[in-house]
Image: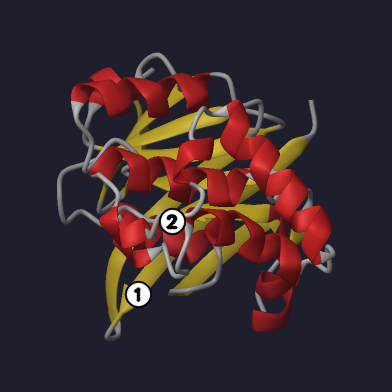
Amino acid sequence: MSCTLTIKNLSIFKNEKTILKNIDINLSHKCKVAILGDNGIGKTTFLKSIVGLEKIDGLIEFFHKSVSSEKEFKEARKNIGFLFQNPDDQLITTSVLEELTFTLLNKNFTEDEAIKIAKEYLKKFNISYLENELPINLSGGQKKLVALLSILVDEPKILLLDEPSSYLDNKSEKNIKDILINTDKTMIITSHNYDFIKDIATAIYKLNSNGLEKIV
């Protein structure tokens, strides 16, 4: 099976200090991996390093092609959907519909095409009634769902999901969980919530300062 993402001997640095090291992982096509870890261990930092937003040493390959320069990471990011832990950090427009059309318009879809696709997604996930709502006024679960759909609508090949179960009540958590179970894409999910990820992930690792330990 083809390899979507390969990371070898990765070290991550902040303020000249090594935060994480010895990280090795391979994700095959449409593999779903969960990364568990204590708060503050660096799960978010790890995800950010994958898309070139942290100082690193080591090998990162997307689809068997090594990336190291900003230009190469910028190109790779076109195939990656990144979900922030806090949806308020991700939602930037003045309506739910705009959130979903924003990326599509930047990908040179016409306005009519972008709106059509966005409305289809809202209908598919039963939130068409929210399309004109201001994202800041939504509930935590609604915000997380809109943030996730704003990524999925762009059809990325890889999803990097930072604590997708945070800010959710039980009903919203189940909704997001079901979506991820039924989303047929390569993904890395960071979490502290084993019960959330155990039915989604095909492999589960624990992150510590000296690398990744496979649990399942």
Mark 1 Cα-neighbour bin, 10 Å: few <14, some 14–19, many ≥20: some
Vertical comparison of 131 with 46: above or below: above
**Hey, which quadrant is residue 48 in on the image?**
bottom left
Please tell me how many numbered marks the rendered image carries. Answer: 2
Which residue: 84% across, 65% down?
A: 110
Is 82 displayed left or right of 169 in the figure?
right
Is 44 displayed left or right of 79 in the figure?
left
Q: Quadrant of the N terminus?
A: top right
Measure the C-alpha gap from mark 2 to mark 1.
13 Å
- On the image, the x and y values in percent for residue 173 come to 29, 27
Q: How is the image coloured?
A: secondary structure
Is 68 displayed left or right of 64 in the figure?
left
Residue placed furthest toward the left: 39
Which residue: 72% across, 60% down?
A: 104
Disc 2 on helix, strand or loop?
A: helix
Disc 1 on helix, strand or loop?
A: strand
| Residue position for label 2 | 47
- On the image, the x and y values in percent for residue 12 come to 39, 68
Nearest the eye: 22 or 4: 4
First in sequence, mark 2 or 1: give its number: 1
| Residue position for label 1 | 13
Residue type at numbered disc 1: Phe
Nearest the eye: 10 or 47: 47
- On the image, the x and y values in percent for residue 196 come to 30, 23
- On the image, the x and y values in percent for residue 57 come to 50, 71
Vertical comparison of 12 with 174: above or below: below
